Image (cartoon, rainbow, N blue to C red):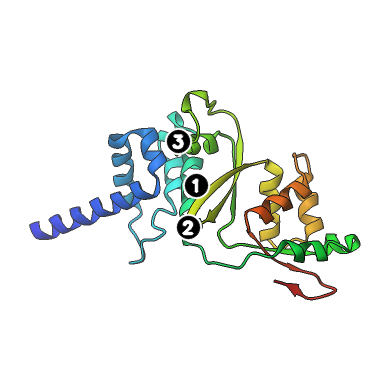
Amino acid sequence: MQRFAVYRNNVTVSLMGAIADTFPVCQALLGAACFRDLARAFVRDQPPRSPVLARYGAGFADFVAASHLADDWPCLPDLARLELACLDALHAGDAEPMHPATLAAVMAGPERLPALRLTLHPSLAALDSRYAVVSIWAAHQGDETSANIDPEVPESAWVLRHDRSARVLPMAVGDVRFIAALRHGLTLGEAAALAADGADFDLTRCLTVLLREQVLTGIHDPDLRIHP
């Protein structure tokens, strides 16, 4: 029995370490001791259901949102969602980016643009938050001074993989809606209309970023064929 208790404790400590590795900014924000207690509570409440631990912690953000820590740190659940999106970007599948010349050829017929359907890179995700989680995350990468951050300022971002690293790009609310709409299978025209509804959205700028970051992987033109 004692040997089993030691084994169980070792497993718990190992899983807590996995949570700390996935959510380093959350840990830095809370402090090591507080985060350790939170991670232990999560491991006990949600033990892994698979031997593959690459995405263990998928329920961490919701667990944090239901904890008392969310009262003192309201940005914490969304910060955890951002960090999980970074992990997902690193483990996502790969796809060849579409050549800009292909997009230029398709867009030569503007009357067909609204009916196009865009295919996005598997690593691309979008996040919209009521809090400054993008700036908080960046501050812990050494990209920004945390003293200048107002945590109550809403922020949005795209998360993607670039050169085997996760990138977090500050974007507008409309850009997040646009990506979500495309992921749900809406056409370019439908997604753009939804993104622009009451939000700051520039379709040309958005497509430019998709091309620059090489996360636009294909276009389906119903009148022609699927463009690689």
- Disc 2 residue crowd, few under 14, some 14–19, many 20+, Cα 10 Å: few
- Disc 1 residue crowd, few under 14, some 14–19, many 20+, Cα 10 Å: many
In which quarter of the view is residue 186 placed? bottom right
Rendered location of residue 198, percent (x, y): 77, 39
Q: Are marks 2 and 1 in contact (CB under 8 Å)?
A: no
For the question of whether residue 1 can be seen, the reply is no
Residue 44 left/right relative to 157: left
- Disc 3 residue crowd, few under 14, some 14–19, many 20+, Cα 10 Å: few
Residue occupying image coordinates x 19% and y 55%: 10
In the image, 32 versus 65, the foreground residue is: 32
Instruction: Give the mark toward the camera: 3 or 1.
Output: 3
For the question of whether residue 51 can be seen, the reply is yes
Rendered location of residue 223, percent (x, y): 85, 73
Kind of residue indicated by mark 1: Arg
Q: CA distance from mark 2 to mark 3?
A: 19 Å
Which residue bears the numbered disc 1? 81
User: Which label's residue is closer to the chain start, 3 or 1?
Assistant: 1
Which residue bears the numbered disc 3? 142
Kind of residue indicated by mark 3: Gly
Q: Which mark is residue 164?
A: 2
Rendered location of residue 51, percent (x, y): 33, 67
Q: CA distance from mark 2 to mark 1?
A: 20 Å
Q: Which mark is residue 40?
A: none
Residue 208 left/right relative to 17: right
| Secondary-structure class at tag 2 | loop
> Image height check: is 46 above or below 67?
below
In the image, 175 versus 205, the foreground residue is: 205
Q: Are marks 3 and 1 in contact (CB under 8 Å)?
A: no
Quick one: quadrant of the N terminus? bottom left
